[in-house]
Image (cartoon, rainbow, N blue to C red):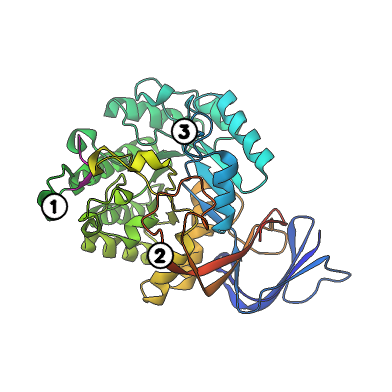
Amino acid sequence: MNIEIKSGRIIDPANGVDEIQSLYIADGKVVGLGGVPEGYKADNIIDASGCVVTPGFIDLCTYLREPGYEYKGTVASETYAAVKGGFTAVCCPPETLPVNDTEAVTNLILDLAERAGFAKVYPIGALTKGLKGQQLSELYSLRQAGCVAVGNGDHSVASLSVMKRCFEYAKTHGVSVFVRPEEASLAVDGCVHEGAVGTRLGLNGIPALAETVAVSQLILLAEETGVHLHLSHLTTAKSVQLVAEAKRSGLRITADVAIQHLILTDETVSGFDSRFHCRPPLRTHADRIALIKGLNDGVIDAVCSQHQPHEAAAKQAPFAESDPGISSVEVVLPLLLGLVRDSELSLATLVKALSVGAAGVLEVAGGSLAVGDVADVCVFDPDEAWRVTAESMLSAGKNTPWGEHEVQGLVKYTLVDGRIAYA
């Protein structure tokens, strides 16, 4: 189908575009920008007046829950929620049941995504068998099956020697490694940031040091092995500093930050509301400001949702005993637009962090609206307000701290491979 997206403000940081133009799509690709291509006739015209048109967003961490945890969500429900949020592609961690440590599980996930027909899915394979942190998975076969990277999710690796072997093996086969940095021995039984708020509430804390020690070790291992290391969900100012130094040294280090760590701080858990229970925990105001600065400076490459849908019962336990995680893929855009309105981010930085920045981490096509590129597109009204409710959310998980909040910024259309996946 030929689709003309008419008179929208096209923001495409990959190609330095920020102007009101029309975008022309045919056969799943961008065929024109500005002027009408010769002989082009649109089958469908989308009036994007007053809207922003960007490359489709790519999420580096969306838990799809399937196979194994369908009571929390499915590939269909969560990719549907993703396209509502403007995401045309999502990465799913290996924490499924069975764990995604074989070609068979990878193929199942990809098949479920194709049948659902919403966002593209980029599986992340398990770094170690069963995510047990000891024996390496068959990284090469996972890569051949379609995994864009490998990682151990929220599970620790037994020792630095095992991690070093993993990095060496991954480097040999050209596989990127995603790691959420946390020194397990410093984070035992913790559920909030170790600081004044956690002490006042009587909750066990996870110190910032648990992250920064791990970041330091991982950077040194990456330097030794030459692997592409991606540090997921950074939360501390010191981590941003360490990554900046590593990048200046020329190391293949990339990093992302989850949306909640750009918006919330440890002060928000004061009411013992388990909807704010996440891992890594919410940090201090100073950390939040440092993360935003890291994003503006290009030290942090991408913003992810770290979307973790849960059934209602998972959040009904006392704070420390509830399952960590936030359902967030549908609200990433309006929350970031709030930072734009507060002059903490520019709109161009927002789009870059959700599109070409994430595509660069994965080394996949996307994040660009140049002629000839795949037509993965998001069209959103930055000013339209809507209320986040259980009814308005498409995710099976309603566990969001922004429930019943009014947010500003609504996705109107999401196009995947030139077809309308959400309207």
Q: Which residues are magenta?
A: 189-193
Q: Main secondary structure of the magenta part?
A: loop
Residues under numbered marks 2 and 3 in contact, where contact means CB atoms less than 8 Å apart: no
In the rendered view, would you say 165 is above or below 147? above
Figure check: 147 above or below 99: below
Dot 3 and dot 1 residues touching (CB under 8 Å) = no
- Regarding mark 1 in the picture, which secondary structure is present there? loop
Give the residue at mark 1. 195
- Decide which of 41, 238 is in the foreground and name it: 41
Q: Which residue is mark 2?
A: 405
Residue 318: x and y, percent? 24, 41
Looking at the image, tell me whether mark 2 or mark 3 is earlier in sequence order.
3
Mark 3 lies on residue: 94
Inspect the image, locate mark 2, and give the three-letter code of the amino acid beneath it: His
- Name the secondary structure under disc 3: loop
Quarter assignment of residue 35: bottom right
